[in-house]
Image (cartoon, grey):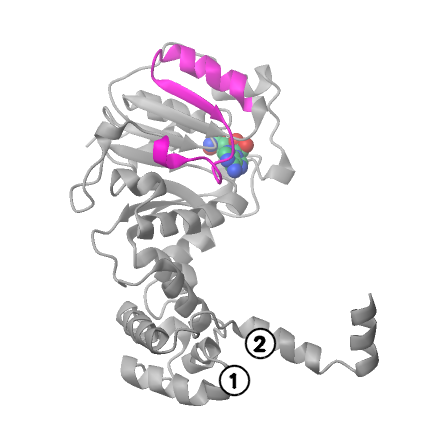
Amino acid sequence: MAARGKVAAFNLPPLPTVGEIIKLFRLQAQKQLSQNFLLDLRLTDKIVRQAGKLKNAHVCEVGPGPGGITRSILNADVEQLLLVEKDPRFIPGLQMLSEAAPGKVRIVHGDILTFKMEKAFPKHLKKNWEDEPPNIHIIGNLPFSVSTPLIIKWLENVSKKNGPFIYGRTQMTLTFQKEVAERLTANTGGKQRSRLSIMSQHLCTVENRFVIPGQAFVPKPEVDVAVVHFTPLVQPKIQQPFELVEKVVRSAFQFRRKHCFRGIETLFPESERLKKTEELMMAADVDPTLRPFQLSMSHFRNLCNTYRKMCEEDPSLFAYNYREELKQKKRQHLPKSTSQTEQTE
Ligand code: SAM
């Protein structure tokens, strides 16, 4: 483990501070892009320490911005650092960091949501899924509007062993709005237990490491932030396709405060809803009067396994979409004159 307060032995040559870089390149945070910077290197060191030992590691930092976390990663003596930054204003400052650590940094001006992670690292780093995680890490402090869709995409990649997980069980250290971090890590019965809790915990060991108070950022965001660490599990807790798990979990949490059967019902067309819901709950051994947040991982596993069997018996079932059925019903019930107007438009 790195010594307390220190990331590792490598030291960057003297450089302007992150604050000076911001002034030098006029990198004022853009509020509409939710840019909030970390200037305190003790804090960025602490974030980077959550990733574990990074000596000789290959790291991808997402959204490096003015480069605070970037410096801490470089000080941890990594082998290679790939930076993916969407805002071109930050590229010159990142190039300055790259020159201070010759041969270590690759800068990509691009969007992490579309960047092809399967080609980002050398092939020789690949590990078998069952082995220890590869020496590859993803680290990032992204805007909240990006970090949530991104983790959902990466969870799907974990499930399919593609994207950054083509290399094995790549670990991730990412920041989230504190409430989102609480949802990611909530246990059965917890106030924040939600779709995100099941989707993340069935695929990864998820740890909420520490909270960064909003005032540590420049400018200060409205909310606090938490650092979350993910290690993909060797065996997912629910061994069913991502889309199927997603559908069951999304349906179950559809009516948070109601009995769970109210959400589960929406998996089935109206004509057979009651019968099929009863069949599913019985076979999965789930008490229909539990609230969605009271359902454990093994409840969800049973629900997904049983729903899979039902889909195999009735191949049209998986395509059934509750919201579509609602929309169609609404259309049918529109007054005639309105539906005629719609048709002629
Ligand atoms: N990491 C820096 C820090 O901690 O000070 C900056 C954090 S700021 C909250 C988020 C950064 O992510 C900004 O630099 C922003 O331009 C970048 N960013 C936003 N969306 C992105 C995307 N889709 N792909 C890559 N970078 C993105």
Mark carried by residue 270: 1
Residue at image location 20% in from the left, 51% down from the top: 234
Q: Nearer the viewer, residue 21 or 55?
A: 55
Mark carried by residue 287: none
Residue 60 x/y as whole percent: 37, 31
Q: Which residues are magenta?
A: 90-119
- The quadrant of the rendering that contains the C terminus is bottom right
Residue 118 lies in the magenta-colored region: yes
Do the numbered discs 1 and 2 sit on residues whose CB atoms are within 8 Å? yes
- Residue lying farthest bottom? 275
Residue 207 x/y as whole percent: 30, 50
On the image, which quarter does residue 51 sit in?
A: top left
Residue at image location 31% in from the left, 15% down from the top: 11
Residue 296 x/y as whole percent: 30, 71
Q: Is residue 276 left or right of residue 285?
A: right
Q: Residues within 10 Å of mark 1 (few under 14, many from 20)?
A: some
Amino acid type shown at disc 1: Glu
Residue 264, above or below 282: above
- What's the distance in space between the residues labelled 1 and 2, CA to CA? 8 Å
Q: Residues within 10 Å of mark 2 (few under 14, many from 20)?
A: some
Amino acid type shown at disc 2: Glu
- The quadrant of the rendering that contains the N terminus is top left
Q: Is residue 1 left or right of residue 300?
A: left
Residue tagged 2: 325
